[in-house]
Amino acid sequence: MGQKAEIEWRSGAVPVSARFDDPYFSLENGLAETAHVFLDGNALPARFAPGFHIAELGFGTGLNLLAALRLWRMTGQQGTLRFTTFEAYPMAPTDMRAAHAAFPELAALSAELVPLYATDTRRISLPDLDFHLIEGDARETLPQWQTRADAWFLDGFAPAKNPELWEAPLLAQVANHTAPNGTAATYTAAGFVRRALADAGFTVSRRAGFGRKRHMTIARMSPDE
C-alpha cells in the first residue's frame, strides 16, 4: 500500500495534514461546509437516482462519504449510491473515527462504515452503498478509471498547498470521467481552477462560499459530451 496521512490535531478536535499544513475540514463546521459545497453544490438530493455515482478527489476523513450516505438515507432513496474516491494518503481508521467525533449526528454511520473501510480492499458493499477508495496519485489512477461520475466532489487541500490535485490535465481527466449533465463542485474559486474546468468542457460559475469564503465553484457538463 502507499503512504499514509500524517495528522496533527488542532484544538484537540480538528485534524490537520502535517504534509500540506491544511485542515481536513472547516474549522467552523465541517459538516455544514460539506452540505453547502458538495451536496447543494451538486444539486443533491434532487438529482439522486438509483445507482447515482459520486466521485471525489481527496477522501480525507471520509466526512463527505458519511454526509452523502446520510442524505441518501434521510431522503428515502431507492437502490444503491455509488461512491468512488481517489486518495494518495489514506487516513488511519482510528484517526477517521477521532475526526468524526466532532459530529455526533454521524456517530452511527461512522461506527458502521469505518470498520469496513479498514480492510485492505478499500471497498464497502452494502444494500444502499457501493464504495471504492482508489489509493495513489490521482494523476496516475484517474486516467485508468473506466467509469463516469454523475457528480464530482473536488476536495483536495488548498490549491496553494496541494497544487497537484488542481492541475489542468487532472481536471481534464475529471471532465473525461463525467457523465452528460454531470456536475462538479469545490470550495475554491481560484481563477486558474475555474479556467481549467472551463477549458475541459464544463460550464463554470461561482456562487457564495461557505463561512468566511466569499465564493466557491460549481460546474456542469453539457448533455452531449
Image: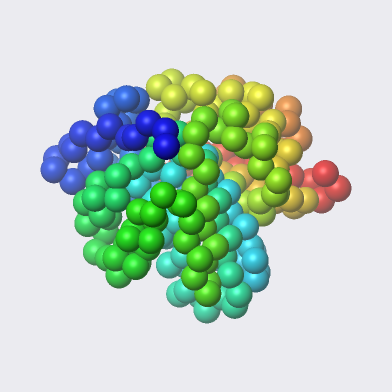
- For the N terminus, the quadrant is top left
Look at the picture and state if 95 lies above or below 124.
Answer: above
Q: Relative to residue 135, is residue 109 drawn left or right?
A: left
Counting from the top left corner in percent of width and height, residue 79 is at: 60, 75
Can you give x and y, in whole percent of width and height, for residue 192 in the image? 59, 22
Which residue occupies 25% across, 35% down? Answer: 7
Query: Residue at point 25% right, 46% down?
Result: 95
Image coordinates of residue 98 in percent, x first then y, are 22, 51
Image point (67%, 37%), residue name: 144
Q: Quadrant of residue 90?
A: top left
Q: Image quarter for residue 83? A: bottom right
Which residue is more in the foreground, 214 or 38?
Answer: 38
Residue at 42% in and 29% down: 158
Asked if 48 appears above or below 99 in the picture, the reply is below
Q: Residue furthest left?
A: 12
Residue 168 shows up from this direction:
yes
Instruction: Give whichever of 170, 121 is nearer the camera.
Output: 121
Location of the C terminus by quadrant is top right
